[in-house]
Image (cartoon, coloured by chain):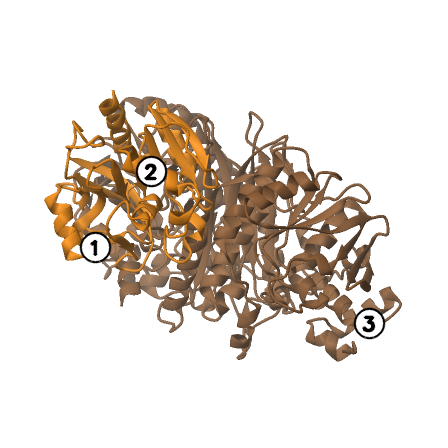
Amino acid sequence: MRSSVIIFPGSNCDRDMDVALKKFGFKNQMVWHNDQSIPKSDLIVLPGGFSYGDYLRCGSIASKSKIIKSVIDFANSGGLVLGICNGFQILTETGLLNGILQQNKFLNFICSNVFIKVKDKQNKYFKDLKKDILELHIAHNEGNYFCSDDELKSLEDNNQIAVTYCGEDGAENEATNPNGAIKNIAGIFNKNKNVLGMMPHPERMIDKYLSGEDGSLFFKNILDNFK
Amino acid sequence: MEVTEAVAIDHGLKKEEFSKICELLKRTPNLTELAIFSAMWNEHCSYKSSRKHLKKMHTKGKQVIQGPGENAGVIDIGDDDAIVFKIESHNHPSFIEPYQGAATGVGGIMRDVFTMGARPIANLNSIHFGSPQHKKTRNLLRGVVKGIGGYGNCIGVPTIAGQTTFDESYNGNILVNAMTLGLVNKNKIFYSKAAGLDKPVIYVGSKTGRDGIHGASMASATFDDKIEEKKPTVQVGDPFTEKLLLEACLELMADNSIIAIQDMGAAGLTSSSVEMASKGNLGIELNLSEVPCREEKMTPYEIMLSESQERMLIVLEKGKEEHAKKIFDKWNLDFAVIGKTTNSKKIELIFDNKKVAEIPIDLLAENAPIYDRPWKKTKLPQKLKFDKDEFKSLRLSDCLKKILSNSNISDKKWIWDQYDHTVMGDTIQKPGGNAGVVRVHGTNKAVAASVDSSALYCFSHPLTGGKQIVCESYRNLISVGAKPIAITNCLNFGNPEKEKNMGEFVECVEGITEASKYLDFPVVSGNVSFYNETKDKGIKPTPTIGGVGLIPDYQQMLTMDFKTEGNLVYVIGKTDGHLDQSIFARELLNEKKGPPPTVNLFNEKNIGETVLDLSRKNLIVSCHDVSLGGILTAVSKMCIKGKKGIKINTLKGLTNKYEYFFGEDQARYIIEIPKDSLKKVNDILNKYSVHFDELGTVNGQSIEYKDDINLPIEELADAHKYWLKKYMDS
């Protein structure tokens, strides 16, 4: 499976994503934000970081960068686009995903392990995933997902809520919500479910010496579904 | 403006220093020249009070590639890999403006590291605040933590360990010490020594503004009531630009275009240009009209003194200008040829086609004043005779809970949750352990790092305190299974013009030197921060040691959490029960006098090597050094982390349980041993002739000791985990 990771000035999880993708057998290439086109890919990843310093609003300048038109075209033609953390923020700024990511409820950056519940498996990311609850890692200051009532209803009606924050036992409540996100939302799809944005970082959980290994399941599953 | 003695004094120079300048120049300097002298001759840049003593430090060893004197120290970790590291203070600015002060402290130290060609792989910090009751403490802490996080998180370098303490002596002078480790190929290290004539001098990075003018002078003076007025001297950081600068510099460093490179830190363009020329024994000519400026009508004086962040000065190979410019254009950074190297051995400044300053380099560097300041020895305080009957009214479990929730012992999760500690995907031991550990990317090796200081011990007896922190750093590295390699230090002290403060400095340095020599744990970099004093009240002497160690195979890393029920727990090293200066004495007896625990370097080395041997042979499964709060505190942390209890044995020959459990004797570790390794462990302990106590067995969900203690782990965890969060929320 061929993948491309876009590097924006200020991206800082691009290498981690490259390492993770290659570890599980993706043929990955790095693409510079000023390039006009993206090499032939089956998956495009917008990595975490602080694109363009996150000035103005997180992800907003990146959403106007040169490369982004190709990303939007790719997504509209049904290609898989994954945005992690800052990548999720960029996807909401492009309009490919609904809603916004506000500053965390307690106004602090949070770097911590979290549990997330997979809410929908009728898609190329989570289909046949063996677990329903994954332990992943978050590291962000603006991960507090918010959208209008109409948007929320539409997300729910179309099963576009991808993952939610929960406890180890799956409980979704205020105590298991690290950043104040509406309905504990940690990640969402577009309508066609080929575009996924989520705050947790699977690429930081890919071997047992790190914070955990559940990120491996995520990447392997995308590959399995591609075959 | 005419330069007079009064103007010189306004610039922080002493009367005698001004006369010396006039004498050396054989004329009165103009204002720009005076500014350059004041920037180079202040304490922060010239080390004029400390240099005499720093010379004695132990800085050599076969593991050392570069010792003090460069942007950072460099050590060999095998296979052509080298670690570049340094710690630096940003105390004065952080007190005036905590967010920017701390942020630019982190930015500055990272630049010191990537200037040498290394990619930063880990950040650490040691931060010290006034009493929790002091009205400024909460806001300062919040601002500093946000500043450190704001900068490090954005760059994408994990913050893997740190230290936070509270003491009333920091009420008017907080300490913010930031440390960075970088990884470099040992054949591709870049230095700041200029070489060759007529080579282009390049300015890259952010534009120059009026921020930070006189920053280094501010850091060389004590504070008074008017410190608020000094806010404009605090620099403003932009981590995004630094990230671009980091990537651009590393890209340019991939080939052989750079002759010398130096970041513009304290005293900005002045000290970077003078240092490069001085090290290369050359002259340098700068055309200040070419310097990219952020503000209009900046004068040569302002350009030379600005401490705007995220700037670098490079001496480039001739003909490589276009190639280099392309890289900096790609990263959207300013690039300007602003001068050249010359054989004049002078710094010559041109502005608007006129020469505006001309000073022989040696007057600024080698001829800078050096002071042999008078100092006073601190006598070893008399050991206290505790009234042990008084102890009897104290329940062990109450004492333990009180100690675990003490501001200096309690869990600092509230802080490190705000630092990205997992970015780069190689953090295998997070903050909150004995030391932070990151893998050397793509290899089996891992590097451990720890920051430590013991101001109470250093205040009580600086010589012992100096030795003790080096040992503490050594132990923290051993406790994660790392072989200690070298240290960096940040020497935070009061006013060197006072004999007592100067004495504290001299004796702490002596202690550090003695211990680092004995342990083959040399000092490879560091900085000195004097004048941590407000309205005549100085800080307790707080030398901070940043230690770095190597784990050849990261699968052998140790953590402190208890692993398996039924495993045996030993205390390695002898416990005499030294309570003077302990947390127990302070917290429960309100007793602040007495000497710190004695440091026995032979024992430190022998016991350290024993534990390392045990870990290399995979005979132990967890390890924690015993320090502040003694055995019971250390064991509690192992229980809390591992979510497992311990049944403590009835100890034979125990004279006093309070002394045993809370004494802060040095050179001790607690280890967890699987039953089937026991014989081999005993053999090794006997081979090294190391004293050990069979403390107990990992068991259940409580700490149990006879009828004295029966505390569920959850209750211990509650006492330990929430002090800081509650404090910050209140």
Decide: marks 3, 2 in contact (CB < 8 A)? no
Residue at numbered disc 3: B19
Q: Chain of mark 2?
A: A
Cα–Cα span, label 3 and label 1 = 69 Å
Chain B color in figure: brown
Cα–Cα span, label 2 and label 1 = 24 Å
Q: Position of residue B532 (x, y in %)?
A: 55, 66
Q: Neighbour class for label 3 at 10 Å: few (<14), some, many (≥20)?
A: some
Query: Upstream in the sequence, badge 2 or badge 1?
Result: 2
Task: Name the residue furthest top.
Answer: A227
> Which quadrant holds residue B566?
top left
Query: For the residue marked with disc 3, what is the amino acid?
Result: Ser
Which of these two is toward me, A62 or B37? Answer: A62
Residue at numbered disc 1: A147
Chain A color in figure: orange
Q: Please, is residue B348 above or below residue B6 in the view?
A: above
